[in-house]
């Protein structure tokens, strides 16, 4: 029987979120949220201690026995077996824990300290380990470790899984591009299709292929699944499973609503649904990479950072259409930047095609922390609300005042009490913040595609129209109400953003 010399229940409340179980209703919501942050810091420190202990076990049971080990029973298996039996986990999971502990201590010591200090969560440490695990030249490891840790410590904001992965991939490509290209070739050589029984009369099919082919195939399956009418009783995952079988086998996909007046337009086998739908795959790169005169990475929407060679392979496909954010022949400004239209000529509320594309390229994903929705599948939202009654009053259609939000996040802000803010900080970085209905400031994502494509910062957009004085009306024609409820709500939000920036010393409001 195992016992511990530490009673976790007797820890001071500050270490477990500061919650008094006897009076939970008296805790302010913000205190509860900040208590979760304290718990996260504790979880990170416990993970650090766990990895440190396991690394010591590795030294004593694995490294010291390497010369005398047998073919099957070696120090690594012996150490993993101890951990697995003690913690009631599989041997494989114990081996993964051993490998992660050694990787953090020996390959990523500065990232390991970030885990100790609560700057990253255990799952974030695992992401960094996995992205750096295949470095061919270990001489780059200290540089990459230092670069990643520097950003984790220095940059304000949060790190969701995809943005953290993209940041690490971007740094690795900068230092070891040949390794990235070689790994892609090896990964492509390992492509194939496998099946596995899942029991109960169902089985799983897995296909490994180029990332762009996966995106195209998934879009084709989704399009066929969505061809069924709204009365089809299957869930969307069920429809997608049936649609995938139909596409692979050439069978007919049918709507299962059972109604005589079904309006579903199901295409014939062998055609993409619906017939006139184009599957659009967004790949972003700079012109030099496309031309082969530069070796900068690209970005595959829905996948992440890809190598320059991968970019050119996609560009060479016969079904690829290449377009430019800055149209060829556009005159450059004196400082080398380019100025493009910000909104549609007849409607200052609607962003121009150039600004729409620029915002989605810059954000990459939904701007909300932790959301992995592609920016190309998001709504574009005016961060400071657009004043339709007096457009000159604020909330203009500008690059700094637009960001990509998933539909749920957009609706929550529009009809709820959430507030967000976006501005350039003193260093010129685009900073996003989210404010809860109780006034708690939550930092936005620390990474955008401006870090991957610095050239995006050279794109300027036309300034919004200058503010015009309000028209002078005779007293009898002046409205009694000073503004609509929506206008008053927007005014309150602008005031709250202004107070928030003063609190954070963020500088002036860029919308004015």
Image: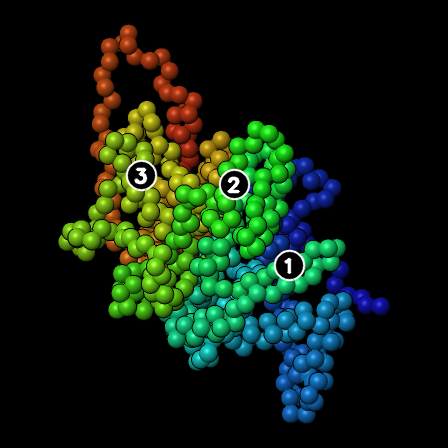
- Residue at position x 66%, y 53% from top? 16
In this rendering, position of residue 324 left or right of residue 39 = left
Residue 122: give x, y in percent of width and height. 59, 62
| Mark 3 Cα-neighbour bin, 10 Å: few <14, some 14–19, many ≥20 | many
Labels 1 and 3: the sequence-earlier one: 1
**Is any atom of residue 377 visible in this view?**
yes
Q: Which disc is residue 61 wearing?
A: none
Q: Nearer the viewer, residue 6 or 427?
A: 427
**Is any atom of residue 421 visible in this view?**
no
Residue 399: give x, y in percent of width and height. 31, 44
Specify the quadrant of the image occupied by residue 60.
Answer: bottom right
In this rendering, position of residue 14 left or right of residue 3 = left
Q: Label 1 to label 3, Cα distance in Å? A: 44 Å
Most extreme residue toward the bottom is: 68
Residue under numbered circle 1: 204
SS class, disc 1: strand
Q: How many marks?
A: 3
Q: Which disc is residue 351 wearing?
A: 3
Most extreme residue toward the top is: 476
- Residue at position x 26%, y 69% from top? 293
Residue under numbered circle 2: 266
């Amino acid at each position: 029987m195992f016992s511990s010399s530490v009673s976790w229940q007797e820890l001071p409340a500050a270490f477990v979120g500061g919650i008094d179980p006897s009076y939970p209703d008296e805790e302010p919501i913000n205190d509860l949220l900040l208590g979760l942050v304290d718990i996260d810091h504790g979880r990170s420190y416990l993970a650090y201690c766990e990895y440190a202990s396991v690394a010591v076990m590795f030294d004593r049971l694995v490294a010291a026995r390497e010369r005398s080990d047998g073919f099957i029973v070696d120090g690594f298996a012996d150490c993993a077996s101890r951990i697995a039996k003690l913690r009631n986990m599989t041997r494989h999971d114990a081996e993964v824990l051993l490998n992660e502990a050694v990787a953090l201590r020996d390959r990523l010591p500065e990232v390991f300290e970030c885990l100790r200090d609560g700057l990253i969560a255990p799952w974030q440490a695992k992401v960094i380990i996995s992205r750096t695990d295949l470095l061919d030249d270990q001489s780059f490891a200290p540089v990459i470790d230092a670069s990643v840790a520097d950003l984790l410590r220095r940059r304000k904001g949060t790190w969701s899984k995809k943005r953290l992965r993209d940041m690490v991939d971007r740094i690795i490509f900068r230092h070891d591009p040949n390794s990235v290209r070689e790994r892609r070739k090896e990964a492509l050589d390992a492509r194939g299709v496998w099946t596995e029984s899942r029991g109960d009369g169902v089985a799983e099919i897995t296909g490994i292929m180029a990332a762009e082919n996966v995106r195209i195939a998934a879009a084709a399956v989704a399009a066929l699944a969505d061809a069924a009418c709204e009365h089809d009783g299957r869930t969307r995952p069920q429809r997608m499973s049936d649609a995938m079988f139909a596409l692979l086998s050439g069978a007919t996909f049918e709507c299962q609503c059972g109604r005589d007046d079904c309006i579903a337009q199901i295409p014939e086998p062998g055609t993409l649904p619906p017939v006139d739908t184009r599957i659009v795959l967004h790949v972003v790169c700079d012109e030099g990479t496309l031309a082969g005169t530069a070796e900068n990475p690209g970005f595959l929407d829905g996948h992440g950072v890809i190598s320059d060679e991968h970019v050119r392979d996609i560009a060479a496909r016969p079904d690829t259409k290449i377009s430019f954010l800055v149209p060829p022949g556009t005159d450059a400004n004196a400082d080398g930047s380019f100025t493009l239209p910000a909104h549609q000529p007849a409607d200052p509320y609607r962003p121009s095609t150039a600004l729409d594309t620029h915002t989605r390229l810059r954000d990459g994903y939904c701007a909300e922390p932790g959301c992995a929705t592609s920016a190309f599948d998001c709504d574009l939202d005016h961060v400071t609300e657009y004043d339709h009654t007096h457009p000159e009053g604020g909330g203009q259609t500008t690059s700094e005042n637009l960001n990509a939000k998933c539909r749920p996040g957009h609706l929550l802000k529009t009809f709820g009490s959430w507030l967000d803010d976006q501005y350039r900080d003193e260093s010129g970085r685009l900073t996003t913040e989210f404010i809860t209905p109780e006034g708690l400031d939550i930092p936005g994502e620390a990474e955008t595609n401006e870090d991957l494509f610095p050239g995006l910062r050279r794109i300027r957009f036309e300034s919004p129209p200058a503010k015009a004085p309000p028209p002078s009306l005779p007293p009898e024609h002046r409205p009694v109400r000073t503004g609509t409820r929506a206008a008053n709500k927007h005014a309150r939000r602008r005031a709250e953003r202004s107070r928030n920036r003063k609190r954070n010393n963020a500088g002036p409001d860029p919308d004015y």
